[in-house]
Image (spheres, rainbow, N blue to C red):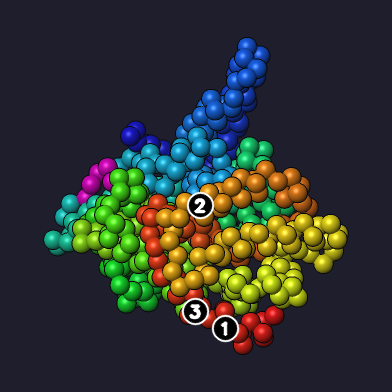
Amino acid sequence: MKEHHSIPVTRAQRAGKFIVTGARIGTNYLKHFGRKLVNPEAGKERLHEDNARDIYNSLSELKGSALKVAQMLSMDKNLLPVAYQQKFAMAQYSAPPLSYPLVVKTFRSTLGKTPDELFDSFTRRAVNAASMGQVHQAVRNGRRLAVKVQYPGVADSVRSDLAMVKPIALSMFNLNPAEYDEFIQEVESRMLEETDYVLELERSVALSKACAHIPNLVFPEYYPHLSSSRILTMDWLEGKPLGEVLKKGTSFSTAQQIGQAMWDFYHHQMHVLRSVHADPHPGNFILTDDGRLGIIDFGCVKVIPDDFYSVYFQLLDSSLLHDEPRRDAVFRKLRFVYDDDTSREVKFFTGLFSELVDLLARPFRNDTFNFAEQAYFQSLFALGERLAGMKELRQSKKARGVRDALYINRTYFGLYNILHDLKAEVKTHAQHIPALNKTALKRAG
C-alpha cells in the first residue's frame, strides 16, 4: 500500500481536500445521470462504488476524525450501501500508512529521541494503519513491542473536520440534521479524548487491571517512559487480527470461548465499572496463539453517568414494555418522545421505539443467547433498513434519543455483529445487571 509522505494539517488545506472531493462526487452523479439516459433501468451500484472510492481516498489522505467517521459508518450495516461499507471498513485496520520521516519527526518532537535511539529495532514501515494513528513493531531489551504513533495534526483538526464532513453525511446518507447536530458533539468529545495518548495510557492501564480476572482475556503491558502525548508503547501480543479470524473462520470451541470472553468483558465494563471500551470493531482485537482474546486498543472509552445508567438500562427489562406508565416515563427521559409532541407523534414514536427496544433487548431475555440465530439478525437488519428510510425520523425537528446513548448503542451494535460473525452462544448474566434490580427500578421510575 502506498505511503503518505505528508498530511494536510491546516484548515485551508483540509477544506480544499473536501472541496475537491465534493467536485468528484458531483462528477460521479453526472456520469450516473448519463448512464440513466442511455439505460433507464441502470441502478446506483456503479454510483455508490465511484463515490465510496473517491470519498475513502480523500479521507485516507486527511486521516484523523474524518476517516474515523467513515469507520464508524462502516459498522452500521443498514445505514450505508454495500460499496460504502466495504470501502469504509478499510479504515479499521488498513488505511494508507504514514512515511517513516514523519514518524521520526513525531518521536523527536514528543520524546526528544528517534526510534533508533529508543529501541533496538523499529520497523520503518507501519504494520497496521487506521484512522487516527498507525502501529510499528519494535524490540527493546529482548521484548517485542507495539508502538502506536498518532498522525500529525489529528488533534488540532477534529472540530473543523467534523464541521466539513457534515454536508456529505447529511446529503449522501440521509442523516437527520437535528440528530447530527446533537450527537456530533458527543462524537467530538470522544474523538478529542482519543487524540490524547496520555489519557489513553491511563485508561488502558486502569481498565486492563480492572478486567484482568475475566477468563480468556489478555492485555498488553504498557510503558509510560516510552510513551507521550502522541506515542503509545505496549507489549506486542502474538496472534491473528480478529477481522482475519472472522473472514477465515475458526473452530467452534474457540469461537465460543472468545465470544464469551468478549461478552463478559463488555458486561463487566457496562454494569460494574461504568466505563466502556466503546470501539468494538475487529481491528481492536486479536486472537492470541493460545486461543485468548487480546484487547489492544483503549482509545475510545465512554464513561457512563449514573443518572443515565439507571434510566437507560431499564430498556433491558422484559416487563418495561408491559408497564405503560413506566415505559412512557423512561421513553421521555431518553427523549424518544417529547412532552410537546403531537398525539400522532407520541403514538408513532412510542410504537417505533417499543419495537426497537423489544428487538435489541432480546439477548437479555434469557440466561443464554445464540448469536448465530439467523432469523434474529434478519429481523434486526430489516428493522435497520426501515429506520434508514423512514421519513418520520429523517424529517423530525428533534433528536430522538439522548447524547449519552450514542456510544452505548454503538458498542452493543458492534458487539452483536462480532458475536454473530463468530456464531457464538453466550451466557448473558442478565440476572446480575444492577439496573434491573426492582428496588432501583422503582426509585428511578
**Which residue is under mark 2?**
375
Percent x, y for residue 52? Answer: 52, 33
127 drawn magenta? yes
Q: Earlier in the sequence, mark 3 or mark 2?
A: 2
Percent x, y for residue 345? Answer: 81, 57
Return the residue nearer the eye: 211 or 79.
79
Q: Earlier in the sequence, mark 3 or mark 1?
A: 3
Tell me the residue at 54%/28% (across/down): 45
> Most extreme residue toward the left, as rendered?
142
391 drawn magenta? no
> Most extreme residue toward the bottom, as rendered?
439
Tell me the residue at 79%/60% (across/down): 347
The residue tagged with tag 3: helix, strand or loop? helix
Return the residue nearer the eye: 442 or 297.
442
Q: The residue under label 3 is which amino acid type?
A: Gln
The residue tagged with tag 1: helix, strand or loop? loop
User: Which residues fall within the magenta stretch?
Assistant: 122-128
**Which residue is under mark 3?**
431
Name the quadrant containing residue 16. top right
Q: Say whether residue 226 is visible.
A: no
Distance in Å between CA atoms under marks 1 and 2: 30 Å
Q: The residue under label 2 is which amino acid type?
A: Ala
**Which residue is under mark 1?**
437
